[in-house]
Image (cartoon, rainbow, N blue to C red):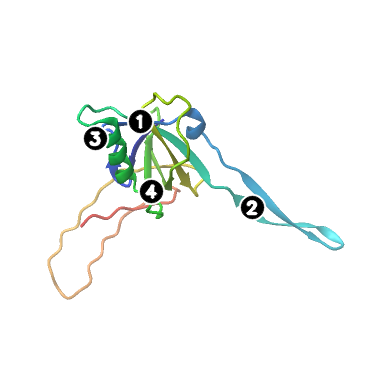
Amino acid sequence: MRLVSFDGNDFDLLNYAAGLPWGSARGQWSLSPRVVPRLGAPPALTGAEISARTISVEFAYQGTDETIEDAIDALLNLLDPENTDPRTLVAERNDGTLVERQAIVTLPGGIPFDETLNYVRVDFVSMEPAWRAQTVSSTSHTTTHDTADEGMGVAIRGQARVSPVVRI
């Protein structure tokens, strides 16, 4: 699995290699059931708490146009860690399937153990336990202006949540 983009910014086009260690690619989250004790009766299950999932990524600059300092500054500007709104993180699985999830950026403190390495470690935190496969489809609608409201039906096949992107 490799990271492809974040918030619409393609890492390959910007000359960054986004290394996704195996521990970050597989599931690293927990499901904790909540049980309430009751007097004179068995405890009641009140649901379960799903933990946030942290995805650690190592970004290395692969280009030749910038110094490593400039490249790291450009990457941090691109990721915009001060923006705490969840944004779309896209990865590609080994079979070519594009998957996504909503995530925010956090920057862990400290430096790599080997100070000679030219990479930046970034943690993405997601509230979703699993990646969702992207489905590429498009449709178009042509209309002329009139007083009636315009609408367009889009058939959604499958049994998964959909996060549509509408471009006008």
Q: Position of residue 115 (x, y in %)?
A: 42, 26
Q: Position of residue 99 (x, y in %)?
A: 39, 39
Question: Do callouts 4 and 2 mark residues in contact (Cβ within 8 Å)?
Answer: no
Q: Quadrant of residue 151?
A: bottom left
Question: Do callouts 3 and 1 mark residues in contact (Cβ within 8 Å)?
Answer: no
Q: CA distance from mark 4 to mark 2?
A: 30 Å
Question: For numbered disc 2, what is the local secondary structure?
Answer: strand
Q: Which mark is residue 96?
A: 1
Q: CA distance from mark 3 to mark 1?
A: 18 Å
Question: Do callouts 4 and 1 mark residues in contact (Cβ within 8 Å)?
Answer: no
Residue at the spot x=65%, y=55% of the render?
47
Q: Position of residue 68 (x, y in %)?
A: 29, 31
Question: For numbered disc 1, what is the local secondary structure?
Answer: loop
Within 10 Å of the Cα at label 2, are there few (<14), some (14-19), or many (20+) other Cα atoms? few
| Type of amino acid at the residue the image marks with label 1 | Gly
Q: CA distance from mark 3 to mark 2?
A: 41 Å
Residue of label 2: 48
Question: For numbered disc 4, what is the local secondary structure?
Answer: loop
Between label 4 and label 1, give the one nearer the viewer. 4
Q: Position of residue 121 (x, y in %)?
A: 42, 35
- The tag earlier along the polypeptide, 4 or 3, is 3
